[in-house]
Amino acid sequence: MSGTLHVVSVPIGNADDITLRALRVLRTAHLVAAEDTRSTSALLAHHGLSVRLVALHDHNEREQVDHLVSRLQRGELIALVSEAGTPLVNDPGFRLVRACIDAGIDIDVVPGACAAVAALTGAGLPVDRWLYAGFFPRETGARARLADELGGLRATLIFYESPQRLGATLEWLATAWPTREVCVARNLTKQHEQWLRGPATEVRAALGDEDRGEVVILVAPPTEAPLVQDADAFARDLLARGLDPRAARDALAEATGLSRRDAYRKVLDLLGR
Ligand code: SAM
């Protein structure tokens, strides 16, 4: 009989945020496949456990999968853990889970901490519909595509972001979605946990030059009613603030409910083009 792959969530900062079942599974597993064996050893030692570990990270997952699947086929119990939070969520493990499913091996999830969900539950933004969109894209083209694809979605958007890029990303949000509430959740469950809420410009100002810690960014869905009634005056103001035509188009469409095409026409008219 084949074994089981346990997909085990671990803390995102506070070492005590681990479930009793997770500890039991980690204690009884024949092997723990860990993204970062050092941090996992430290976590296990904190809970008085000492287990056999093998590294499974982005650079070796392809090779490790066959080895782990054959051990599972021999009946072993293997636990998969990330450096922090829930495996597979912007972390390794997808290939392994997929391979186990294809090989008919049982998957057992042991749920727990996940930064995206933790941030969502404290942000104060709608939770009835939300979309986790991974790390915020870095390139200008990818950001424009993001605005196109997700801009009109009536759902709270959740992104991971590096602390060094947070300031620039908030500036982008202030331009693309100026009227939406944003929340930055920093260092969740850690000593310097911080929540910043408000329009992106205010959150950017409150952040100052802080560029440390781990952050989740959440963006409120677009409001039903357009916030700006006088589209011409708003567009003139955007151009006076130095926005380029495409950025002004996006901000205008967002605030007035105009289609991006009509918003662009208005911007170009005002520029006399
Ligand atoms: N698997 C993890 C999870 O379940 O949340 C996510 C791993 S991903 C590689 C790391 C990113 O998650 C960080 O860059 C940050 O955006 C977010 N993150 C992880 N821990 C966090 C924390 N304590 N506070 C805020 N964000 C965190």
Image (cartoon, rainbow, N blue to C red):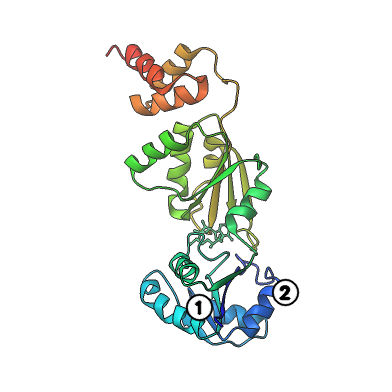
Relative to 199, residue 260 above or below: above
Residue found at x 62% / y 51%: 119
Please state the horizontal and vertical placement of residue 218, each as a whole percent of the image. 56, 44
Residue contact between numbered discs 1 and 2, judged by CB atoms under 8 Å: no
Please state the horizontal and vertical placement of residue 81, each as a whole percent of the image. 55, 72
**1 or 2: tag closer to the N-terminus:** 2
What element does badge 1 sit on?
Answer: strand
Please state the horizontal and vertical placement of residue 228, each as a whole percent of the image. 54, 18
- The residue to which callout 1 is attached is 33
Residue found at x 59% / y 57%: 115
- The disc at residue 220 is none
- The residue to which callout 2 is attached is 20
- Quarter the C terminus occupies: top left
As measured in the structure, the alpha-carbon distance from the residue carrying label 1 to the one carrying label 2 is 19 Å
- Quarter the N terminus occupies: bottom right
Relative to 15, residue 89 above or below: above
